[in-house]
Amino acid sequence: MILLNPGPVNVSPRVTAALARGDICHREPEMNELLTRIRHRLVEAFAPRSGFGAVLVTGSGTAALETAVTSVLSATGRLLVVSNGVYGERIAAMAAAARLPHTVIETAWTSPPDVARLAKEAEAPDVEAIAVVHHETTTGLLNPVAEVGRVARAHGKLLLVDSVSGLAGDALDMEAVGADLVVGTGGKCIQGFPGLSFVLVRESAVPQLLANPRRSLYLSFAGYWEAQERSTTPFTPAVQIAYALDEALAELLEEGVDVRIARYAAAAALLRKGFTRLGLQCVLPAERQSNTITALRIPPGHTFATLHDGLKRRGFVVYEGQGKLREEVFRIANMGHLAPADFESCLAALGEVLRA
């Protein structure tokens, strides 16, 4: 089955084989070596100019994101949340669940953020951090993270970037953006399995984060940082998933992050040319689209169910719309260990379904 949903993704045989490396106790030195190697490889891949560290969290990308959101404020701070899709709304929901003061800077799901309003709100002295989604999976919208970062730097605020579906799919220069915390996961563009996620953190921001209240036992940045700096782990990690993530990161570094991003961009271009040929309409203009997801209007005479089921019978899994776009759009992702022939076959199958 070819997975054209935005994670989990198809992985290489090499990554699958890593699951069978063997059973070890999570308190043994070899497990500490594995986790330390993964942390170093994450920094090498995504923050090679140093000044960053990484913490690993067993859980989906949402777990690492909630770890960052609930750890970023002092007892008197407020968070600004840039929201133009389901995942911006999810950050606000995390802040609300933790009873953190926050203000949502909301725009339409197909539009970039209101940077002028964000800059005005950032003037308030109680605002300590700004959170933004790098790649809004709802529509495939790529947000102007660098513009948001300039606002954060100009006002001395921490910048938290949700790049769960962005890292290794679209470029994110940590220094140019000025990010302080960047959240990612192994089960999307890194081409590992779901179950291990991470927070990349600017080391100069760590003392501030460690001083903040600990609002969760399991999802505490301070707890993970302190344990992993002692070459241990606060809780039992997903051992076999760690093996696979280690191997997926090795593959990524061998391929090169820039090369993988270019591979995804080429796949998206191939698909979008085919979508146009089939008469399908993209939700976003080309200049706002990411390299890895295309949101398409459901054509007249079809429903998501007819499209999904017809494609699945032909060996392809696509994704439905979310939230208020649920009945209007479907999404096709091009993440994972896939070749151009897979995408050509998808277009042929989609053409058959549309004609049927």
Image: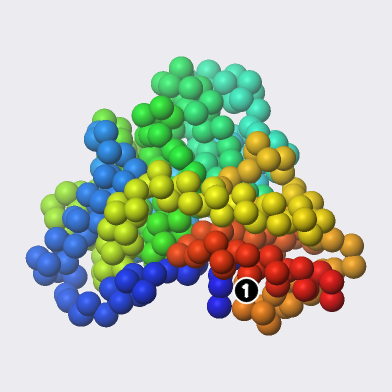
**In x, y percent, where is residue 46?**
34, 43
Compared with residue 1, is residue 300 higher up or lower down, i.e. above or below? above
Residue at the spot 16% in from the left edge and 66% down from the top edge: 31
The answer to whether any part of residue 76 appears in the image is no
Colouring chosen for the image of the structure: rainbow
Residue at the spot 19% in from the left edge and 56% down from the top edge: 37
**In x, y percent, where is residue 163?**
47, 46
**In x, y percent, where is residue 57?**
34, 58
Compared with residue 101, is residue 33 higher up or lower down, i.e. above or below? below
Q: Residue furthest left?
A: 29
Q: Amino acid at mark 1?
A: Phe
Q: Nearer the viewer, residue 310 or 78?
A: 310
Residue at the spot 13% in from the left edge and 52% down from the top edge: 230
Q: How many marks?
A: 1
Q: Provide the secondary structure element on which disc 1 rests.
A: strand
Quarter of the image where the C terminus is located: bottom right
Residue 178: quarter of image? top left
Q: Nearer the viewer, residue 148 or 221?
A: 148
Compared with residue 134, is residue 251 higher up or lower down, i.e. above or below? below
**In x, y percent, where is residue 21?**
22, 77
Quarter of the image where the N terminus is located: bottom right
Q: Residues within 10 Å of mark 1 (few under 14, many from 20)?
A: many
Residue at the spot 22% in from the left edge and 49% down from the top edge: 40
Q: Residue furthest bottom?
A: 313
The residue carrying mark 1 is: 316
The answer to whether any part of residue 177 appears in the image is yes
Q: Residue furthest right?
A: 301
Residue 193: quarter of image? bottom left
